[in-house]
Structures are given as structure tokens and as C-alpha cells.
């Protein structure tokens, strides 16, 4: 086990080199695992396919709240880095407000975006029992000689100067340490190695007290990184400053790259006016004081992660009411309220209230009300009312209504729709999806598609996001001369225009691509799959007409020919 102490040290001086702009290493970790971790690419594709299929079927969010046990591993070199229990408690408090939409600054969301706000219904608590079944405060403390960790996961192992994780299927592991190079934190998406699963936060961006330093002193770095741990992506889609990226969430506007600092509403990019970027979202890069919300689409994606790849962690509990009101309500309520009402209220009402109503109310209604209604009401009502209704209604209704509906509806619908959809769609999608449901992702995240077969694929950009125009799929076909010869993308430089995104560049065979020609074939196949997903989403939303259906059939045929089917 790791070295334990109470860590009540106060910072002797501000840390040097504090980050001035938000930086997150999650995307870099994701790309590294795609290149180096066996089965990670397949697991990620399987998870994203599960999310896409569930969204098309009309996913219903889980009920109640999910309570997740947390272990905080404090890895320190100096007394300043050995943060206090109070600083850790302040971070847990922030998480419980942000992931229950009980943060006070939620009111700062601009009115056009307020309908998008949603409550993820997640609670966090420091673990009370360790992996050996012993009582714990949910905090480990480890002394190290490392002067600044990076996103290489060294902090997650005692052999490299860090702290070993607790079982990631039972605890959310959070490592707090000094990160080098201005890095605020990073996380691992679902589907990665269990030995490195969790979240890492620099100690100056953790919690709201102690060493936490502005502009990242409100605990939102952990909110952002845990969002990644629950399968949320950066809101701009990680395509640099372009407008082709996607976070696979339908209600987050497309935006041209990350926002920093504290932007002013509206900030318009990628023709997303008049409201512009949703920069106040937790998954952007703004300062702690500017990020305040999750959307309903992001909450659905979080719940899909909790139902699927993270189904083994946490317990479902009643959400209950807000915590702050019960503390204040008993203090003022019971003392002040009972004193005056009992004395004043009974004196007057019994004397005054019965006097007038009984005398005045019965006099007029019984005499006047029966006289006129019985004489006047039957004359016009019974005679005139049935004549018109019975004669007029059957004339036009029965004759005209059945003619058009019965003749016109079967022509286009039943003949064209079932033939292609039923034959083509179930081949790749439903068979794999039914076999491995939400519960199997943790047990067997990878799979072998077999020689010459294309594995389940990541949902393409644009499938879950509204395209610029429903007449034109938002797909960037690969510019083959620019395709990187090394799989899956260049680890440092961003993908240049015309190059497929990192997920779509993953080869379909089990090994790495061996030639530019195979890379081109993989990228082209990815484009066909992207088109299939796009037209599938149009069909699911009722926007696919006859022309769209014909185009989809052409895509399926081309895809099958490409795959050798």
C-alpha cells in the first residue's frame, strides 16, 4: 500500500509556472492508446457503435442517481504538493454540485441555451472501504522524487514514482500531483487498459482551497476530465480550428476550435449564429468561472457509458432533494412561523366567514336558475343539434377519407422501404450489437473480425450532429495524396485538411497498414461507413425521402463491393 498521512500542510508559496490557459491531455492519451494498446481501437469502435445504435432507437436515460466511490491518490514531492484533506473535500463538493446541476452559476447560462441544460444525476463520495475490505477515508498519499509528471501515465504506477490504482471497475481513481508543461489534467476514455483507467489533475487545479490557483481554482478541471472518463469528447470535436469535427452529441453546436478565458456571448464560429458557441459547457477550454453546464445530449451519452462500458461501477440510489435548503429551512421556519398565525387567524375567520355566505348565496341561485334553463334549453338544443351533425358528417367523411389513404399509402411505403433496409442493414449492425449488449463491454471489450472483414466502426462525424444542410452529408472525403502513411495519425501535428480523422483512419485489418494503397482503401471504406451512418440517422429522424433512400442503397452496394462481399 502507499504511504499514508493526513497532509495538513499549508502551501508555503504559490507554485511556479501556473497554467494560464486550459490544457487537457485526454486526446493525446487517446491517440497514444490507439497506436499502442492492443484491442483499444476495437473497444472504442464497439462502444461508439453501441451509443449510435441506442440513440437511433430512442435511448431513455436511466432512472435515479448513480453514486460513484472515489479514491484520491495524492502523489507529492514537496509539502506544498501534499494537499490537505480539506482541499480534497472541496473538490468532491464541486463535483456533487456540477453533476447534479446544483451549481449556483448555472444561472449565468444565456437564455437561448438554458433549455439545453440538464442534470447528469451523478453523486461522488470518497470510498469508505478499501480493496481489502478495510475502512478507509478514500485518500492515499505517496511521496515521490519526480518533479512534474506528464500524460505518459507514470503517476499511475509505484514502479515509476506514482501510486498504483485501486480496481477501476469499483472505484474512480483520481491522481493529484504536480503536472509539468502547464498541463492541467487528463483522463482515459472507456475501453482502455484497466491499469491506467482514471483521471489525473495537477494539484493547483484541484478543489477550491489550499494550492488551487486562479483561473482554475473552482474545481472545474476535475469536472471536465471526469466528463471524458464518462465518454464525453471536447465540444469542438478535436479537429483543430476546423468545422468538420464532432463530439457525437446532437444538441451541442458545431464550433471552430476551443475557447479560452471568459468569452462574451455570443461568440459565433462555423456559421453557428445567432447564438454561436456553447462555450459555457464543461467540455470547452474556458476558465473555471466560465464553464457551468452539461447538455441533455451529453447526459444521455454519460448514461450510455454508465449502462455500457462503466456498468460495473457505482450504485443506483434515489436522487432526493437539494441539500442546501434542509440546512437553512429549520432554523428560521419553525421559530418564526408558528408564533403569529395561531393567535390572529382563528379570531376573525370563524365570526365573519359564516355570516354572509349562508344568507346571501342560497337566495338567488335556487329561484332564478331553474326557471329559465328548463324552458329555453330543450327548444333549440335537441331539435337543431342532431339534424346537422348526423346529416353532414357521414356525407364527406366516409366517402373521401378511405379513398386516398388506402390507395396512396401502400404504393411508396411498403414496397420500397422493407426490401432494402431489412436485407442490407442487419448484416453488420444488428448481429454484432445483439450478441454483445451493454453488459459485455467491460468483460470482453475487443474482438477479432476475421480475415478480410471490417470491424464495428466508430460513428462518423455528423451522425450525431445536425449537418450544415440535410441535402448534403457533412463528410470530408479523404484527399489521398495527403493521407498520412503512418497509422493512425501523426501523434503531434494536427490532421491536415482533407485527411480523415484519427478514428476513421484506423485500419480494418488486425495489424497496421502496410502501404499507402491499403491506407487509401481503409479511408475510402471509412467514408462509405460514414455515409451509411448519416443516412441511417436521417431515416431514424424521419428526414429520409425516396432520393435519400436510393443514395443510401448505392452506398451500401459500393461498401459491399469495397469489402469484397
Image: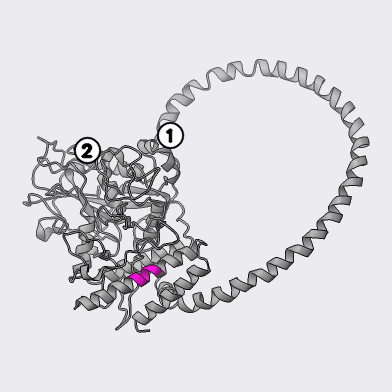
Which residue is drawn at the image coordinates 63% and 73% (left, top)? Answer: 411
Q: CA distance from mark 2 to mark 1?
A: 32 Å
Residue at point 32%, 64% (across, down)? 476
- Residue 57 appears left or right of 170: right
Residue at 29% x, 44% y: name it.
92
Would residue 47 be seen by someone viewing this image from the given angle?
A: yes
Most foreground residue, 562 or 341: 562
Quadrant that contains the N terminus: bottom left
Look at the picture and state if 267 lies above or below 458: above
The residue mark sitting in front, 2 or 1, is 2
Res 215 label? 2
Along the line of sight, the residue nearer the viewer: 238 or 322: 238
Name which of mark 2 and mark 1 comes first in the sequence: 2
Q: Residues within 10 Å of mark 2 (few under 14, many from 20)?
A: many
186, 210: nearer the viewer: 186
x and y, in percent, of residue 360 in the image: 81, 20
Q: Residue at x 17, y 70 (%)?
A: 486
The residue sitting at the left extreme is 145
Name the quadrant containing residue 481: bottom left
Give the label on residue 326, or none: 1
Rendered image quadrant of residue 228: bottom left
Q: The C terminus is located in which quarter?
A: bottom left
The image quadrant of residue 243 is: bottom left
User: Magenta region: which residues?
Assistant: 527-531
Examine the structure image and report whether residue 185 is included in the region drawn in magenta: no
Give x and y (percent) for residue 296. Answer: 42, 50
Measured along the vertical axis of the image, is residue 483 above or below residue 100? Answer: below
Amino acid at each position: 500500500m502507499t504511504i499514508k498521512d493526513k497532509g495538513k500542510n499549508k502551501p508555503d508559496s504559490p507554485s511556479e509556472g501556473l497554467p494560464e490557459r486550459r490544457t487537457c491531455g485526454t486526446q493525446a492519451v487517446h491517440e497514444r492508446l490507439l497506436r499502442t494498446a492492443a484491442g483499444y481501437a476495437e473497444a472504442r469502435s464497439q462502444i461508439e457503435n453501441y451509443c449510435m445504435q441506442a440513440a437511433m432507437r430512442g435511448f431513455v436515460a436511466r432512472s435515479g442517481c448513480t453514486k460513484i466511490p472515489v479514491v484520491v491518490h495524492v502523489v507529492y514531492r514537496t509539502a506544498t504538493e501534499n494537499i490537505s484533506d480539506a482541499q480534497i473535500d472541496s473538490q468532491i463538493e464541486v463535483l456533487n454540485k456540477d453533476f447534479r446541476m446544483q451549481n449556483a452559476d448555472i444561472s449565468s447560462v444565456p437564455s437561448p441555451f438554458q433549455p439545453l441544460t440538464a442534470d447528469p444525476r451523478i453523486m461522488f463520495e470518497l470510498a469508505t472501504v478499501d480493496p481489502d475490505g478495510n475502512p478507509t477515508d478514500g485518500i492515499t498519499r505517496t511521496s515521490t522524487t519526480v518533479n512534474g509528471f506528464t500524460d505518459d501515465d507514470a503517476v499511475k504506477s509505484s514502479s515509476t514514482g506514482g501510486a498504483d490504482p485501486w480496481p477501476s471497475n469499483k472505484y474512480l481513481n483520481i491522481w493529484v500531483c504536480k503536472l509539468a508543461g502547464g498541463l492541467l489534467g487528463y483522463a482515459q476514455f472507456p475501453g482502455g487498459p484497466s491499469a491506467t483507467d482514471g483521471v489525473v489533475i495537477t494539484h493547483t487545479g484541484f478543489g477550491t482551497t489550499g494550492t488551487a490557483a486562479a483561473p482554475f481554482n473552482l474545481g472545474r478541471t476535475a469536472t471536465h476530465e471526469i466528463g471524458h472518463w464518462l465518454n464525453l469528447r471536447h465540444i469542438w470535436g478535436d479537429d483543430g480550428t476546423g468545422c468538420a469535427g464532432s463530439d457525437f452529441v446532437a444538441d451541442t453546436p458545431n464550433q471552430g476550435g476551443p475557447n479560452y478565458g471568459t468569452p462574451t456571448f455570443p461568440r459565433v464560429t462555423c456559421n453557428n449564429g445567432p447564438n454561436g458557441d456553447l462555450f459555457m459547457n464543461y467540455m470547452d477550454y474556458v476558465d473555471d468561472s466560465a464553464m457551468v453546464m452539461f447538455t441533455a445530449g451529453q447526459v444521455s451519452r454519460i448514461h450510455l457509458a454508465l449502462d455500457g462500458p462503466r456498468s460495473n461501477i457505482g450504485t443506483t440510489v434515489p436522487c432526493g432533494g437539494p441539500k442546501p435548503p434542509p440546512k437553512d429551512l429549520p432554523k428560521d421556519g419553525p421559530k418564526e412561523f408558528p408564533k403569529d398565525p395561531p393567535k390572529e387567524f382563528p379570531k376573525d375567520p370563524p365570526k365573519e366567514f359564516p355570516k354572509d355566505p349562508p344568507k346571501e348565496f342560497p337566495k338567488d341561485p335556487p329561484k332564478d336558475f331553474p326557471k329559465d334553463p328548463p324552458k329555453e334549453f330543450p327548444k333549440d338544443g335537441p331539435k337543431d343539434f342532431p339534424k346537422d351533425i348526423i346529416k353532414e358528417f357521414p356525407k364527406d367523411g366516409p366517402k373521401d377519407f378511405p379513398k386516398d389513404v388506402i390507395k396512396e399509402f401502400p404504393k411508396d411505403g411498403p414496397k420500397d422501404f422493407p426490401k432494402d433496409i431489412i436485407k442490407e442493414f442487419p448484416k453488420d449492425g444488428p448481429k454484432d450489437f445483439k450478441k454483445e449488449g451493454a453488459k459485455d463491454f467491460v468483460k470482453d471489450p475487443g474482438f477479432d473480425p476475421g480475415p478480410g472483414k471490417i470491424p464495428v466502426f466508430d460513428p462518423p462525424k455528423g451522425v450525431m450532429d445536425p449537418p450544415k444542410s440535410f441535402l448534403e452529408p457533412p463528410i470530408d472525403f479523404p484527399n489521398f495524396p495527403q493521407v498520412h502513411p503512418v497509422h493512425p495519425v501523426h501523434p503531434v501535428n494536427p490532421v491536415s485538411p482533407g485527411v480523415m480523422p484519427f478514428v476513421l483512419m484506423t485500419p480494418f485489418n488486425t495489424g497496421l497498414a502496410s502501404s499507402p494503397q491499403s491506407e487509401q482503401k481503409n479511408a475510402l471504406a471509412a467514408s462509405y461507413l460514414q455515409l451509411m451512418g448519416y443516412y441511417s440517422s436521417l431515416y431514424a429522424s424521419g428526414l429520409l425521402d425516396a432520393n435519400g433512400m436510393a443514395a443510401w442503397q448505392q452506398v451500401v452496394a459500393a461498401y459491399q463491393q469495397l469489402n469484397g462481399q
